Amino acid sequence: MTTAVAHRYEPRGAPKQLFAHRGSEVLLSGPAGTGKSRGCLEKLHLMALVNPGMRGLIVRKTRESLGSTALVTWREHVAKEALETGIVSFYGGSAEEPPQYRYGNGSRIMIGGMDKPTKIMSSEYDVAYVQEATELTTTDWENITTRLRNGRVSFQQLIADCNPDIPTHWLKQRCDIGATTMLHCRHEDNPRLFNADGTLTPEGREYIKKLDALTGVRKQRLRHGLWVAAEGLIYEEWDDAVHLVDPFTVPENWTRWWTVDFGFTNPFVLQMWAEDPDGRLYLYREIYRTKRLVEDHAREALRRVQRCTGCCRSKAASHDCFGCDECHLEWTEPRPRAVICDHDAEDRATLERHLKLSTTPAKKSVSDGIQHVQSRLKAAGDGRPRLFLVRGAVVEVDEALSESKKPTCTADEVVGYVWDRGTAKAQAEEKPPKEVPVKENDHGMDALRYMVAERDLRGRPQVRFVG
């Protein structure tokens, strides 16, 4: 007996073109909020329904990042009715198989990340969907294409989406030479934002207003969908494929450092760094949040590096071991050699009191610090740079920042970190610009610079406990 399920989706523009496209590689490129992911997932779902035995794949650079992005759209909008009626069921995976959605007709859609590719790369597929494909390397992309040979569909296809990046990105170049077909999405393609007659919906008015408030390269990419590099970019040496690395277990013998840039309305940033025996720096964990007190950030930091081994067993509902003087806390990783902070005396005192660690004022020479960061981003004698950011290092995404399309972590800030070229009048008079960055969306950049300045511009202080 066949179960009838009603599901409504009306693709427009590029997503509609995607449904008819049969080429081997197709990329939906466009600004934030144009319905790219929804379109890709709807096609994947439809193909699984009408092709018994089809094998599909939903993949991103890291498996963890899918949980709050593509899979939310999948469960709440795309496969919602099919999951509710049992036509599709979720299987959590095993030692042999990755997590997957199983269809009554024998189709399967696997879930995975290229950070742990063993399970997903051992299977063959008819179609794969890559979310935020600019996060991948060329090798990742090509490895996925080699697995598209299941043969249960008349064509095998790699579908992907992304927000625009720099014009020299390997994915843009792949589209330029015709290896991948690029379909351009617009906000008008999204029925949640625009009515069929081209007028904005109430939700659309609010969303477009947020995007119009962006500045610089973020506005050009996320509002207008342009593949552009920021004019006056400070860290021209930055390359996502090189300087962003997958999560790994930091060896116990690596030196740890913490850097802090205080904020409340603007983000508070606490970065945890590890230094390998060769002096390379890795940002492996960070707190990046607004609207929280310093003491709350301190407790959050301690939760990540300590555990309670002697609880006072308080019955209070509000009891927090990490803010309790009676509980005994044990460090689960090496203490930082220094906690390097912005110079705000009151915030430093509060942080010291709650961390029970001393702090060191940051060396805030901007020009020198930037030059040393630039130097570390360049390849050293062994062909590798000396500074890396671990992908997904932020412990909790600030939803308010995400909704406003502002950076939610240090890595997000790099593309918009530009030199201040002065006023239009100064430019017209051809006055030389000051060598200072634009003071906007730079809180992670400041903390990163503090770290490099500490290591490259002065010696090593020692942390002491404070009462």
Image (cartoon, helix red, strand yellow):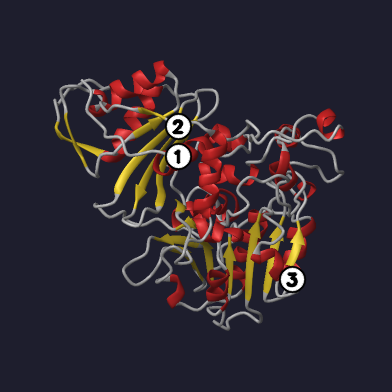
Contact? badges 1 and 3 (CB < 8 Å) = no
Contact? badges 3 and 2 (CB < 8 Å) = no
The local crowd at label 1, few if under 14, some if 14 to 19, many if 20 or more residues have their Cα within 10 Å, is many
The local crowd at label 2, few if under 14, some if 14 to 19, many if 20 or more residues have their Cα within 10 Å, is many
Q: Which residue is mark 3?
A: 21
Residue 139 screen position, x and y as percent:
54, 72
Disc nearer the start of the sequence (2/1): 2
Vertical side of 179 occupied by 168: above or below: above
Q: Is residue 225 left or right of residue 450?
A: right
User: The residue under label 2 is which amino acid type?
Assistant: Lys
Q: Residue at x 73, y 59 (%)?
A: 15
Q: Residue at x 54, y 73 (%)?
A: 144
Residue 257 screen position, x and y as percent:
34, 41
The CA span between labels 2 and 1 is: 6 Å
- Which of the pair 191/429 is nearer the observer? 429
- Which of the pair 292/346 is nearer the observer? 346
User: The residue under label 1 is which amino acid type?
Assistant: Ala
Tag shown at residue 363: 2
Q: Quadrant of residue 205?
A: top right
The CA span between labels 1 and 3 is: 51 Å
> Which quarter of the rendering shows the C terminus?
top left
Q: Residue at x 52, y 53 (%)?
A: 377
Local secondary structure at mark 1? helix
User: The residue under label 3 is which amino acid type?
Assistant: His
Q: Which residue is mark 1?
A: 453
Disc 3 versus disc 2: nearer the observer:
2
Local secondary structure at mark 2? loop
Residue 396 screen position, x and y as percent:
44, 39
